[in-house]
Amino acid sequence: MESTINAAAERIRAAGAGPARPARDPVNLPMIRNWLEAIGDRNPRYEQDGLAPPAMTQVWTMRGLHPAVEPADPLSAMSAVLDQAGFTSVVATNCEQTYHRYLRDGERVEVRSRLVDVSGPKRTALGEGWFVTTDSTWYVGAEAVASMTFRVLKFRPSGSAAAPPTSERASAPVSGPASAATSERVSAPVSGPASAASDRDPDPASDVLRPVVTRDTAFFWTGTAAGELRIQRCGGCGQLRHPPGPVCRQCGADRKDHLVARGTGEVFSFVVHHHPPVPGRRLPIVVALVELTEGVRMVGEVLGVDPAQVRIGAAVQVDFVRVDAELTLPAWRLLS
Amino acid sequence: MISGRAAIVGIGETEFSKDSGRSELQLAVESVRAALADAGLAPTDVDGVVTFTMDSTAEIALAREIGAGELRFFSQVGYGGGAACATVQQAALAISAGMARVVVCYRALNERSGRRFGRVSRDVSSASTSSGVDNGWHYPMGLGTPAATVAMAARRYQHVFGATGEDFGRVAVAARRHAATNPRAWFFGRPITLVDHQASRWIAEPLRLLDCCQESDGAVAVVVAGVEHAADLRQTPAVIAAAAQGSGADQYIMTSYYRDNLTGLPELGVVGRQLWEQSGLVPDDVRVAMLYDHFTPYVLMQLEELGFCPPGEARHFIADGAIELGGRLPVNPHGGQLGEAYIHGMNGIVEAVRQVRGSSVNQVAGAGPVLVTAGTGVPTSGLLLALPGRGRVVP
């Protein structure tokens, strides 16, 4: 198999640059404005001078939502060979772009790519795979305006045997049968927005870190599974506390009780977690320390929110994320 | 009182790297042998050993592999980097109580090439201990890295006191400036600017990459002996003018989120009050400070908690370069864990000893005492080290 892959790589490499792929539209201000807004770049110069942000270079030659197969494209050709050999999943690992000048409103660009290198098989954390490197150059007429070195890892997902290609795996490498059980919202005591399922990671539920549950804490987790956010209340003095413990810290009584919280509170502080990976979640995520209306604090993920919208003091409402039959996590949603 | 009874008489380090290429046990042995040689002592002189509960090398393995004989005192201190100065405190307690004569303290880790602490640890979150139960209130919710746990407090600190990411960045800039002139530092010759800091990627907002310390392989050891014994040894002793541990009310490991506010480090306040009380010193006496710098915001909070400035004002305190070489209170002239290496705070103790001896590559002039702190956000510890006769020892 290695020799087949190497032979194909050599053939595609020797063929040099593939056919030029012209942009669907000329460089244009509407697209530039959309891009600047999406990125949050307020530099007025682009619009004033009719210049395109250099980092948009690739945008002009994107193939649209439903691209046709382009067998003559070197990366497509090499990917097809690796798909056939069972290396069906793909992850981009490197992208270095060089901009020779600004593109101007109205210019028509085209891109040509060539295969530079194929190395493997390599053992990676994702699975065994091959690194495929291509060089692309963008032209306006004969003038090169930008270039890019792009590297992907085509890999066989860990845990899958040397199997025939499955397009399902290629498109969603981490998804599997277990994902059907992942994260569905079971209840929201007060009205809440739509299902949490779409916000959550396709990782198997088994990846989510699980709490160590003891006799002191089981009531809380039984509560979340039933759609109740339970706060420990001392059966002696009535003191509320979270996280819970075995005996009241105020009066020393061992009379365990709890109340069901209203499920409302305010963000006391929050984190937007970008790195490193968190099992069972797609980053970034917002995790907040919420001060409940009842006065205790509790950590939970804020679901379905643009991180830029979250503020200390923001009102939140509880939601519940069912991981599986044994674990339901409390989480939060911003109110209005 | 513990003050003035014992001294650090030897220091030893391996090189600091990203891939040591040898076992943690070997690193431990190398650093301890180096520290003993520095002190002019032999392995057979050692009768006490202290390390971190997180260290993979047991006291007996260390003693066995350096060729020591019988041990009379051995112990481990918990809570991650919070243990650093407490290892020396344990040694000083054992020596002043007559339980041991020569105690080595060490920390050896392949933290970059081996287990990386910055990752989410399934083992930590699933431990069937009280700490494992505590972690159940945070890890499953997606809050499972040291940076993220610090970021939660840092955001609140910004909100309450108006501190900014640039204020955090100035701590990193100072550390990297110092590391740039320390050949032992990983970032030797590689200073950064505030612009570099602000351009570095988010790790856990409001923390950026350059707010986070390095990941390192390496080992550090120190040798502790009584002050009378120290007088006969090779090096100028770094006398332990004070040594303290501290845990705050409602203490958790990195997630003490249930106190009235999140803007201080009460556990370090416990340490600071003891350091000043034991030594009779005040913050103004301190010539140079080694503040544990796994994440920049906690350096600001330490300055406040130790009394170098009022709560919330550290950003003003550091704004004019006060914590850089030549400033009012140089912090971490070796580059700290941001710039030199992450050896769980033990390399800060070694730099403090060099500053007492006058042998640092980034020496701070003067003969005043040197402060060292250990891991923050966890139960922690601290030291004040001084030249013989230079601590204002309380009788």
Image: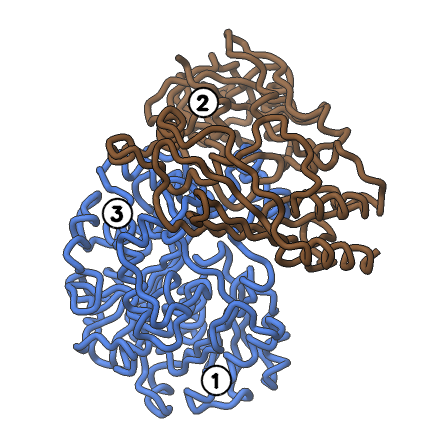
Chain colours: A brown, B blue
Q: Secondary structure at mark 2?
A: strand
> On the image, numbered disc 3 is attached to which residue?
B166
Front-lying residue, A314 or A284: A284
Amino acid type at circle 2 is Leu
Observer-side mark, 1 or 2, equals 1
Residues at marks 3 and 2 on the same chain: no
Q: Tell me the SS state at disc 3.
A: helix
Tell whether B231 sits left or right of A255. Answer: left
Q: Amino acid at mark 1?
A: Ala
- Residue in the picture at 60% in, 14% down: A227
Q: Which mark is residue A99?
A: none
In this view of the protein, which residue sits in the foreground, A48 or A166?
A48
Q: Is residue B312 left or right of residue B152?
A: left
Residue located beneath label 1 in the image: B34
Q: Quadrant of residue A133?
A: bottom right
Could you tell me how far apart the alpha carbons at marks 3 and 2 are, in whole angstroms? 39 Å
Q: Is residue A247 above or below residue A79?
A: above
**What subunit carries mark 3?**
B
Q: Which residue is mark 2?
A: A240
- Quadrant of the rendered image containing residue B115: bottom right
Q: Residue furthest top?
A: A191
Q: Is residue A204 above or below residue A17?
A: above
C-alpha gap between disc 1 and disc 2 = 54 Å
